[in-house]
Image: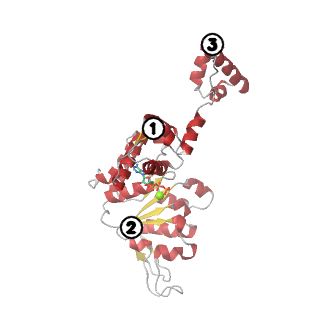
Amino acid sequence: MFPSNNNDAFASIIGRSPVIESLIRSAQIVAAADVPVLIEGDTGTGKELLARALHQSSSRADKPMVTINCAALHADIVESTLFGHEAGAFTDARERRDGYVQRAAGGILFLDEIAELPLNMQAKFLRLVEYGECQRVGTNQIEKVDVRIFAATHTNLLKRIDQGVFRQDLFYRLGVVTLRLPTLHERRRDIPLLAEHFLREIAERSNAPACHFSNDALALLKQYRWPGNIRELKNVCEHVSALLPGETIEKDNLPQDILQAGKAVSTGYTLPEQGIDMEQLEIDLIKQALQHAKGNKSRAARLLGLSRDAFMYRLKKHGL
Ligand SMILES: Nc1ncnc2c1ncn2[C@@H]1O[C@H](COP(=O)(O)OP(=O)(O)OP(=O)(O)O)[C@@H](O)[C@H]1O
Ligand SMILES: [Mg+2]
């Protein structure tokens, strides 16, 4: 089966690294099937963007996608917020109200941060996923609602199951199809493309000329670990565009934490004026590494930041 729907929906997801191209290919196929989708990925990797693209490319594109941030649900009113209530169900319930679930009827319900969904609500969602049934607060009547569920998580749900705070049966129902977004570091070859896209977008929005990163600056951006992933890269682009509109962004114009991380990667070793004997230095370092590692060659290699093969080659080269 191949999706007949709007494949341009995925055009907003920038990236050409193999991992993201294969993810988009899977997502295009999955979007067309009317099954739940679980989206996994660290913070800022584009889970919500992917959910929107799946919605736009699905047969439910002309119906709403209603997003529930499970981490921000108010404990006292969580059930009526989600499933609605009858008039008189509780003190302030003057009239019958729809919840998120009814508002998503015919469309998509996007359960963001699903790991934070309270356990008693998980049971109710299981019923919704399995039978398309739910109950408003204040009635025993069963209501049929046709929704397709997308869920997103940045925490490992298997760990939550082990801790007894996430239902295994719900996990298996929601995870029929799982799409995992890579971290930005895992797809660092996309950094220039993403950065250029954001700089252009920001410039268009503010009607100003676009900035560009110098090659040195880009090299540093590719080396940085990006704990906040694509959101953090986008913020850096906002930052430099505001400070230096239309200019070439050099390494030193980058935010401090990126510069610091770049420096931390360098050894900090300064070459003495009179120079050194490189060959002898290498021999000394190898001997020291072997000593520290008590003769364990794999550990010694790791101490020098080398693969075992590269280490063995050097041992042989120096006759050690
Ligand atoms: N591949 C991409 N191409 C272009 N923009 C992207 C891409 N991925 C993410 N973004 C942008 O990065 C920002 C963060 O993305 P999004 O909100 O989808 O991440 P998230 O995984 O839901 O984050 P969180 O876990 O913090 O909720 C958004 O502004 C989004 O538009
Ligand atoms: Mg999100």
For label 3, the SS is: loop
The amino acid pointed to by label 2 is Val
Q: Which residue is drawn at 44% across and 75% down?
A: 99
Please tell me the numbered disc located at residue 318.
3
Q: Residue at x 39, y 73 (%)?
A: 103
Note whether ligand 2 is within 8 Å of mark 2.
Answer: no
Structural crowding at the residue carrying mark 2, measured as other residues with C-alpha within 10 Å and reported as few (<14), some (14–19) or many (≥20): many
Q: Is residue 180 visible?
A: no
Q: Is residue 24 visible?
A: yes
Percent across and percent down for residue 180 are 46, 49
For label 1, the SS is: helix
Quarter of the image where one finds residue 146:
bottom left
The residue that label 1 is drawn on is 218
Note whether ligand 1 is within 8 Å of mark 3.
Answer: no
Q: In this view, does 164 lie above or below 244?
A: below
Q: Is residue 61 above or below residue 212?
A: below
Percent across and percent down for residue 149 are 42, 63
Q: Which residue is drawn at 46% across and 86% down?
A: 87
Of tags 2 and 3, which is closer to the observer?
3
Q: Nearer the viewer, residue 318 or 61?
A: 318
Query: N-terminal of the two: label 1 or label 3?
Result: 1
The residue that label 2 is drawn on is 147
Please tell me the numbered disc located at residue 89.
none
Percent across and percent down for residue 242 are 44, 51
Query: N-terminal of the two: label 2 or label 1?
Result: 2
Q: Which of 248 and 145 is in front in this view?
A: 248
The amino acid pointed to by label 1 is Leu
